[in-house]
Amino acid sequence: MPEIVEAAVEPALTEPAVLDGVRIAGELWLSDGVRAGTFNTLNGDKIYPLPPRRRAAGPVELRLRYRLGGGLAEFDARWGAGTE
């Protein structure tokens, strides 16, 4: 797996909304096929704030970047083209 992970995602809104953050959630895998699940004390959900954007229903673009092992200090989320 690469150390730097980058992605552009396009969730679709089903109704108009004000978007102001990203919820980060995960689960722990011990090895191939061995899923330990989620633990609030280890990898509980986090909210990463974003500048608020009022959007109509439809797709929005979000660009994500993370350096593995860097914690939240190495996570970045930004609005993509057309969402700014």
Image: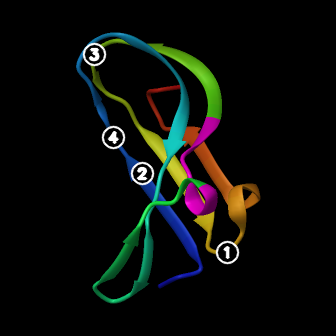
Number of residues whose C-alpha sits closer than 10 Å to that of mark 3, classed few (under 14), some (14–19) or many (20 or more): few
Q: Is residue 11 magenta?
A: no
Type of amino acid under label 2: Ala
Disc 4, disc 1: CB below 8 Å?
A: no
Secondary structure under the numbered disc 1 in the rendered image? loop
Residue 46 image point, x, y percent: 59, 44
Which of pointers 4 and 1 lies earlier in the amino acid sequence? 4
Type of amino acid under label 4: Glu
Secondary structure under the numbered disc 3 in the rendered image? loop
Residue 43 image point, x, y percent: 57, 59
Tell us which disc is closer to us: 4 or 1.
Answer: 1
* Pointer 1 residue: 69
Tell us which disc is closer to us: 1 or 3.
Answer: 1
Which of pointers 1 and 3 lies earlier in the amino acid sequence? 3
> Which residue shows up at 62% across the image and 74% down it?
68
In this rendering, position of residue 66 left or right of residue 80: right
Secondary structure under the numbered disc 2 in the rendered image? strand
Query: What's the mark number on residue 28?
Result: none
* Pointer 2 residue: 8
The Cα–Cα distance between marks 4 and 3, rounded to whole angstroms, is 12 Å
Residue 41 image point, x, y percent: 62, 57
Which residue is nearer to you in this view: 48 or 59? 48
* Pointer 3 residue: 57
Disc 2, disc 4: CB below 8 Å?
A: yes
* Pointer 4 residue: 10
